[in-house]
Image (cartoon, grey):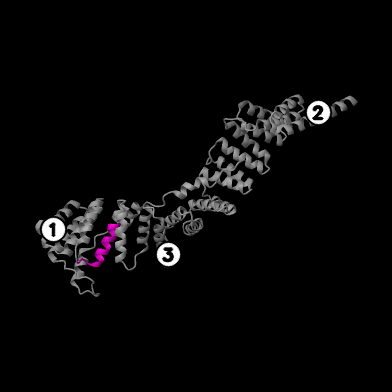
Amino acid sequence: MKLFNANTWTRAMLLAAPVVVAQVAVSQLQSDLGYASLSAAYAQEQQQQKQQETRRTPALRNKVYERLSEAQTAAEAKNWSEASKILNSMIAADGKRELNSYELANVYNLQAFIAYSTEDYPGALRAYSNVIAQPDIPLAMEINTRYTVAQLYFVQEDWKKGIDALLKWFEMTETPPANAYVLLGQGYYQLKDYDKALFNTEKAISIYKEKDKIPKEQWYNLARFLYFEKEDIPNTVRTLNELLQHYPKKQYWVQLSHMFGEQKQDKKQLAAMDTAYVQGMLDKGTEQVTMAYLYLGGEVPYKAAKVMEAGLGNQSIEDNSRNYEILGNAFRQAQEVKKSIPAMEQAAAKSDTGELYARLGNIYLDGDQNRKAISAINKGLARGGVKRPDNARLVLGMAYFNVGEYEQARKAFEAAAKDERSRGYAQQWMKYMNTELERQAKLQAEL
């Protein structure tokens, strides 16, 4: 039996996009984004700064603070229209001229928060851009806003602008966190700049490792995908091993098995898949059939048969001719001929051609069930589609010979001899049969 390539079906899993950047950015924004308490900001301004500021920021005046506080209260109650009404009135033609840059920045910042909360991402971007455009705002405010702008570009799948905004943010940040490197890596991934994507993703992973923190699963997945795309199999294997150390899931065992297959490390390929199987992870029929093929390739046919038997028994493996054929062949290779027969009977009955009946005839012959061998092979030849009808007729001739139907045996051998591939064997059998008939005739004459 020609073995199925057990690596093929897992390739789609390895090529699947490992992460959706827009979703990640939204998730991160939901946790990062928030409108800072105005009372805290105002109180801070009333105190003498403990650290020297790098910028001289205008003060937030009390009357402006009160209006902003009203808008924030409305926003916290999700009364978006009331909050927007207050803010719009503050930056109307006359009012806008009365506000200093820091006050305007706070108005735009709250407007951006409202826009984001109502999923108006373009509006949020415009408002945050207005925040950044204000001169002399606190450096921390500008840095935080630039990072949010980059995230919003990613949410809208504007990867190039997102990357440019994030790079500007990196220039202003002394110690960027790991999340920022991953976000940048994901942006480069979307632009198919895999070298830069991998560099930034690995940087994020290393930051977490240096702090004895476990890198996030999606980071490893992105790195794994990028190494695979670069055909760097050793590093793909290394990354999968790290994934399995922290996130022991079926898909990673399957992918690791595939990678060992790419490296022609058959024993490791089998071991990785077997680890998933013994843990009960391979719950899909396709996975179990792959496991059976790997056992067959590893010359462990009995285990292959038990995998197929269990899967067909609990219906996780599809009840079709091909799968029963695998079961029958596995039992036969394991020298369990009696167990292989029912499986091959099922396989033949479910098949559209006579090929499996011809194979079944071989198994019957091996088990000394000659009448069944004759019936199966004749059925197969009648149905058609037998790949080597000459071989089938050789077996048929042997079965007829074993039951003493010599004339039928001769016809089968003569038919087999018409094919030069079986001619020699067929003639040897006819010669042997003639000798046997002569021997029997002499014995009969002596009686």
On screen, residue 438 versus residue 302, left or right, reads right
Rendered location of residue 141, percent (x, y) = 24, 64
* Structural crowding at the residue carrying mark 1, measured as other residues with C-alpha within 10 Å and reported as few (<14), some (14–19) or many (≥20): many
Above-or-below relation of 421 to 305: above
CB atoms at circles 3 and 2 under 8 Å apart?
Answer: no
Region of the chain picked out in magenta, as a range: 136-150
The residue indicated by pointer 1 is 90
* Structural crowding at the residue carrying mark 3, measured as other residues with C-alpha within 10 Å and reported as few (<14), some (14–19) or many (≥20): some
Q: Measuring 41% from the left and 61% from the top, which residue is drawn there? A: 199
Rendered location of residue 403, percent (x, y) = 75, 29
Between discs 3 and 1, the one toward the N terminus: 1
Above-or-below relation of 221 to 62: above
Q: Quadrant of the N terminus?
A: top right
Q: Which mark is residue 206?
A: 3
The residue indicated by pointer 2 is 434
Query: What distance separates the C-alpha of mark 1 from that of mark 2?
Result: 114 Å
Q: Which mark is residue 230?
A: none
**Residue 447 seen in the figure:** no
Instruction: Give amino acid for label 1.
Output: Met
Q: Quadrant of the C terminus?
A: top right
* Structural crowding at the residue carrying mark 2, measured as other residues with C-alpha within 10 Å and reported as few (<14), some (14–19) or many (≥20): some
Of the pair 337 and 224, the residue shown nearer to us: 224
Between discs 3 and 2, the one toward the N terminus: 3
Q: Quarter of the image holding residue 147? A: bottom left
Of marks 3 and 1, the one in the foreground:
3
Q: Measuring 57% from the left and 35% from the top, which residue is drawn there? A: 321
The question of residue 289 being in magenta is answered with no
